[in-house]
């Protein structure tokens, strides 16, 4: 069973291959994304993060999920030498961490129900588990940032997360917090494969903000691989990335 719904301002796709899947199972996954959007959307005045930014709610009085996200964001800031920072222009925006975390938690709902073969994808970031309908590893395409309809690489993977930071949907929106909030313009796309989508997404966001040295940061992380495309259309990848390439 496969469905795509628009949530959090982006297409969210869930596919479960296991025959026991039912419509209510997918409804529960999408309900979780709706909950995340209501809590963390910086575009909704009623969200918890908006109340924090308006100083109507103190962090210590916020929900457990909000306090968790803030703690994970601070951990990521320290692990990335400050290149990941949710505080900008006097406001908090944890979107760079929330999406991957939410995808991972949504996928966990399926795992906890006993499903083994599925994927959960939101806005190009994906958590994979088990096999596809053909009994093979899942296939994931990387789009050309210069031509959205073109796939430049097809990956074959399972039981991992794949995240891409770049200009595909929202345009150039990732800032370098170490350069007065300047937009990162050297790299147009950076894909990270990690042990799960939470890890892949947070480090992809930070590495993209690092610009040209971001791929080197990914290469130094144990259990991660990366692939980047720069403004001159040059592709660069880490040493172990090739084992995930199904075909070009």
Image: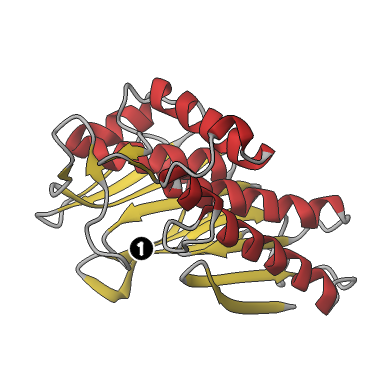
**Could you say where residue 162 lies in the image, as x and y percent from the top left?**
50, 51
What residue did someone put label 1 on?
A: 248
**Could you say where residue 47 lies in the image, as x and y percent from the top left?**
54, 57
Nearer-the-camera pick, 20 or 34:
34
Q: Is residue 2 above or below residue 186?
A: below
Q: Is residue 134 left or right of residue 90?
A: right
Q: Is residue 209 left or right of residue 21?
A: left
Q: Which residue: 59% across, 78% down?
A: 5
Give the structural element (helix, strand or loop) at label 1: loop
Residue 162, can we see it? no
Locate the C terminus and report the quarter of the image it occupies. bottom left
Locate the N terminus and report the quarter of the image it occupies. bottom right
Label 1 neighbourhood size at 10 Å, few (<14), some (14-19), many (20+)?
Answer: few
Q: Which residue: 71% across, 67% down?
A: 31
Nearer-the-camera pick, 236 or 99:
99
Residue 236, can we see it? yes
**Could you say where residue 102 lies in the image, as x and y percent from the top left?**
60, 51
In the image as oriented, which residue stretches furthest toward the left? 232
């Amino acid at each position: 069973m496969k469905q795509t719904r628009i949530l959090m301002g982006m297409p969210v796709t869930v596919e479960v291959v296991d025959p026991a899947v039912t419509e209510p199972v997918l409804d529960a996954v999408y309900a979780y994304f709706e909950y995340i959007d209501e809590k963390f959307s910086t575009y909704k005045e009623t969200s918890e993060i908006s109340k924090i930014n308006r100083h109507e709610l103190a962090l210590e009085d916020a929900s457990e999920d909000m306090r968790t996200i803030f703690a994970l964001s601070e951990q990521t800031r320290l692990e990335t030498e400050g290149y990941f920072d949710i505080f900008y222009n006097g406001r908090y925006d944890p979107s760079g961490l929330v999406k991957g975390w939410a995808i991972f938690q949504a996928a966990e709902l399926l795992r906890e129900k006993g499903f083994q073969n599925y994927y959960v994808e939101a806005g190009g970031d994906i958590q994979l588990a088990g096999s596809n309908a053909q009994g093979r590893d899942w296939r994931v395409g990387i789009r050309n940032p210069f031509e959205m309809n073109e796939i430049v690489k097809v990956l074959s993977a399972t039981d991992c997360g794949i995240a891409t930071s770049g200009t595909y949907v929202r345009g150039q929106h990732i800032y370098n917090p170490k350069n007065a909030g300047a937009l990162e313009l050297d790299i147009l796309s950076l894909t990270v494969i990690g042990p799960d989508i939470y890890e892949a997404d947070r480090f992809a966001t930070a590495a993209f903000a690092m610009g040209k040295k971001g791929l080197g940061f990914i290469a130094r992380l144990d259990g991660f691989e990366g692939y980047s495309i720069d403004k001159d259309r040059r592709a660069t990848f880490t040493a172990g990335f090739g084992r995930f390439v199904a075909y070009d």
